[in-house]
Amino acid sequence: MSKIQTSTAKRRKMSDIRKDNLKQILLSAENLFAERGYTSTTISAIASQAGLPKANVLYYFKTKETLYKEVLTQLLVLWMQHMDEMTSEQHPNEALPRYILQKMKQSKQHPNASRIFAAEILHGAPYLREQLQTDLKAQFIKTCQVFHDWIAKKWMDPISPEHLLFLIWSSTQAYSDYALQSSLLMDKEELGDNDFETGLELISRLVLKGCGINLV
């Protein structure tokens, strides 16, 4: 192997190690912030759960606040990305169910991140307020305009785009934020795949029919 090949291989290995470390740190932080809250979670505890020295965690994230914000930001970026995928050219009978599917997937795959977000909002969004008032608000306005365009094309009834988004958010995030309550009421250890599929089908049907959109 040439020196160039050796150097490239080393850089690739270092890059892989960095990605693995970041993934493990963020996952551990997500779990602990959801379980203990921001105040009671420490960098030492996150490092221990991630199986890394505390110094390694501080190498990537200088403070607990920086790490906490990154957990929230990653979730918010995904949510905005799925909102941005809806366009005026798409018909709502395809775009809305697809959006609801992505929101349900997030609730299923990252329930702790959703719970952290909910707790952050309940506490007045002290660490996320700026992003909510800038990035999310800009995407919110853009998506509402897509809904207005669909209404103008008579593809859906003249409903409130803002409140439609609130409805979709609350119903899909309930499958993470209130999963324990739902499980207890149905005498289950936890929500299963069938529960998410049933919820997805019901929410999609209610949204489409409630907005006067023909079912596919």
Image (tube, grey):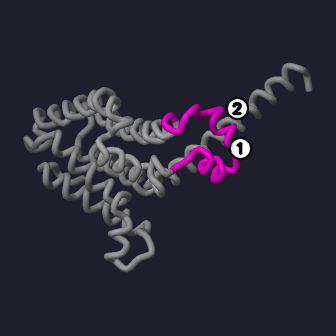
121 sits to left or right of 154:
right
Q: Is residue 79 above or below residue 15?
A: below
Answer whether residue 89 is visible to the viewer in this image.
no
Question: Which residue is drawn at the image coordinates 40% and 54% (left, top)?
Answer: 107
Image spot of residue 5 (x, y percent) = 84, 24
For the question of whether residue 62 can be seen, the reply is yes
Residue 130 lies, in percent from the top left, at 33, 29
Q: Kindly report the distance in space between the C-alpha atoms of the residues bearing marks 2 and 1.
A: 18 Å
**Picture residue at 33% right of the left edge, 69% below the top:** 181
157 to the left or right of 62: left
Residue type at tag 1: Pro
Instruction: Residue under label 1, please give it.
Output: 53
Residue nearest the observer in this picture, 198 or 111: 111
Point out the stretch of residues depicted in magenta: 41-66
Q: Circle 2 is placed at which residue position?
A: 15
Element class at badge 2: helix
- Measured as percent of width and height from the top left, residue 34 is found at 45, 54
Residue, far top: 4
Question: Viewed as shown, does residue 198 lie left or right of 28?
Answer: left
